[in-house]
Image (cartoon, rainbow, N blue to C red):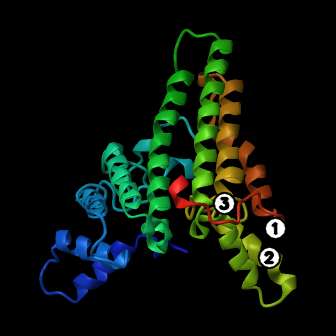
Amino acid sequence: MEGQQTNEIVYDLLLSQAWSGDPIDTNHYFKSWAAARYSSSKRPASIYAAWETVRTTVYDNTNLTLMPSVPKSIIELIPRTTDMADIIGILGTKLTYEPATMVSAWKQLYQAGLQDTSLFNNSAYQYDIVDWTRQVLSNAFIPIYEKILQIYNMPNQTAETQATQLRTQEEQLTGQLLSLDLVLSSNKNFRLSTWLSAARASAPHPAYADFFEYEARNQITIWGPSGQLIDYASKAWSGLMKTYHLKRWQMFIDYLVATEPANYDQTEFQDVLLPCELSWANSTGAKLDESDEELDVGDI
């Protein structure tokens, strides 16, 4: 799974360009695409403003040498004390736009729903508002992470003061990831259970269901017997956020509290994580702590 078909307008535009001898006017294309996506050309102007905002910012990455792919959220990566938010290249994390622009676009998209409440029953809008909320909350996690590093590397502080401040940040990151998990659970396309149920249903015989689930769990986490391609196919899904990503970040705080900066050892920390990661991948057949009901999008 290479994360295909999750960014629909990119694939639609790419295929449309293949049939055009001239460069496509993306301004017109985005407007027409949004009208088709939400089944009407008479939607509120704010919905087109939202897509125009992301067209000129989020989707306007022209430096493919710096970031040749969509930035990966640091939430989905093994925590570390080097600046995770500035990784460039394939599987990089560096944002190519200001996070505030994504917030503005989200507000415009949500405003459209308030102006035309029928959008809340539109499956494409339901998907997009969850997806954009996911991105906003993921971006908002970066300052929390940066604050953790600032506290950890602050000189001339007692171990007790450092630990207290780190635990305060742990509360913030926990609240952030649980909020993200709740939002993601509001749409079946962002649920771990959807992925695992499909894997189990693909088994040719019930006796193979656990194996198929294991393969599905392994692929989106450690991907290999012992993490050979770890986080390569990571996902921001409910269930996964709460039971896997959050646990790793909480263990990161535990390690920081117990380890002086001069003694920090990333390899040692990852050795601490691996048994938990393996255990998660092998937890087949377990009931997920995850909502299976569609929440009211208007309550997000």
Of residue 71 and residue 6, the one placed in the foreground of this image is 6
Q: Which residue is rendered at x = 33% and y = 56% of the image? A: 67
Q: What's the residue type where badge 2 is placed? A: Phe
Q: Quadrant of the N terminus?
A: bottom right
Sequence order check, earlier mark of 3 and 2: 2
Instruction: Return the residue at label 3.
Output: 222
The reply to whether callout 1 and callout 2 are in contact (CB within 8 Å) is yes
Instruction: Return the residue at label 1.
Output: 284
Task: Give the spatial CA distance, label 3 vs label 1.
Answer: 15 Å
Q: Which residue is rendered at x = 38% and y = 64% of the image? A: 116
Mark 3 or 2, which is nearer the eye?
A: 2
Mark 3 or 1, which is nearer the eye?
A: 1
Q: What's the residue type where badge 1 is placed? A: Thr
The answer to whether residue 237 of the structure is visible from this angle is: no
Sequence order check, earlier mark of 1 and 2: 2
The answer to whether residue 101 of the structure is visible from this angle is: yes
Task: Determine whether the residue tagged by mark 1 lies in a helix, strand or loop.
Answer: loop
Q: What's the residue type where badge 3 is placed? A: Ile
Q: Which mark is residue 209?
A: none
Task: Give the spatial CA distance, label 1 vs label 2.
Answer: 8 Å
Q: Answer few, some or many: residues within 10 Å of disc 1's Cα (few below 14, many 20 plus, some between 14 and 19).
A: many
| Whether residue 19 is situated above or below residue 227 in the rendered picture | below
Instruction: Return the residue at label 2.
Output: 211
Of residue 217 and residue 274, the one placed in the foreground of this image is 217
Sequence order check, earlier mark of 3 and 1: 3
| Whether residue 262 is situated above or below residue 84 in the rendered picture | above
Relative side of 78 to 30, left or right: right
Residue 128: horizontal and vertical position, in percent?
44, 65
Residue 107: horizontal and vertical position, in percent?
37, 50
Residue 49: horizontal and vertical position, in percent?
25, 59
Of residue 146 and residue 288, the one placed in the foreground of this image is 288
Task: Give the spatial CA distance, label 3 vs label 2.
Answer: 16 Å
